[in-house]
Image: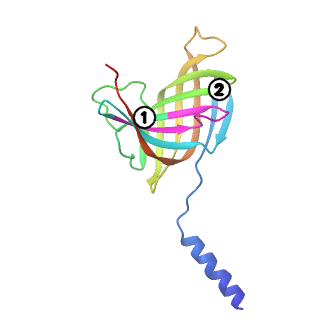
Amino acid sequence: MYRSITVGALCALALNLPVHLAPRFALDTTGAVHLSAAGNEAQYGVITDDGTSILTVSLGATGNSSSLQLRMPGVGLPAAGRYPIRSTWNNRVTGNAFHAFFAAGSPEHPLGWFHGESGTVTITRAADGRLSGSFQIRARGFLTADTTEAEHWVTVIGSFEAEGDSTTTTIATVK
């Protein structure tokens, strides 16, 4: 009897503890390139350049598969919600839109490079050193088999659980 009470108490405690998933990402593409990629390399951090700060979410950047980078102007984490993908930024755009860059294939066997033109990033959680969400991105770019044509399109769909990088990278302009 005491054994079942102990097991029951431990289960109740486990269910009340906050869940911290390991960093991870998964994505699938359709269009000019068909592939799936997943891994545990999912981080976010802030890059500062001449007083301008950019939040960067990096998925698979140094791994052996495809990678996606999401960037948003600003130093803070975005609140939970849905954010558009913008193909360009100007002085009027602040922290309410993402830029997306997708590298298809591995560093040894690249397939192409694509720039997000439209779509959304949905942030589901932004707290405790974690940033979670999903994305659906329509991107245009080129294939490495044909670098003269930059009108190839892919759709990138996926999700992530990114871990915060404790450093801030400052880029100084050399004069």
Range of the magenta residues? 53-69
Q: Is residue 161 left or right of residue 109?
A: left
Q: Residue furthest bottom?
A: 1
Nearer the observer, 47 or 32: 47
Nearer the observer, 166 or 129: 166
Q: Is residue 84 magenta?
A: no
Identify the residue shown where x is 64% and y is 28%.
Answer: 30
* Callout 2 touching callout 1 (CB < 8 Å): no
Give the image quarter of residue 113: top right
Q: Which quadrant: the N terminus?
A: bottom right
Q: Which quadrant: the C terminus?
A: top left
Label 1 sits on residue: 98
Identify the residue shown where x is 66% and y is 87%.
Answer: 5
Give the image quarter of residue 8: bottom right
As measured in the structure, the alpha-carbon distance from the residue carrying label 2 to the one carrying label 1 is 24 Å
Q: Reply above or below: 142 against 163.
A: above
Label 2 sits on residue: 107
Identify the residue shown where x is 58% and y is 8%.
Answer: 148
Whole-percent x and y of residue 66? 63, 31
Nearer the observer, 173 or 155: 173
Q: Is residue 89 left or right of residue 150?
A: left
Q: Earlier in the sequence, mark 2 or mark 1?
A: 1
Could you tell me which secondary element the residue under label 2 belongs to? loop
Whole-percent x and y of residue 158? 59, 40
Q: Is residue 62 magenta?
A: yes
Whole-percent x and y of residue 10? 63, 78
Whole-percent x and y of residue 49? 35, 30
How many marks do you count on the picture?
A: 2
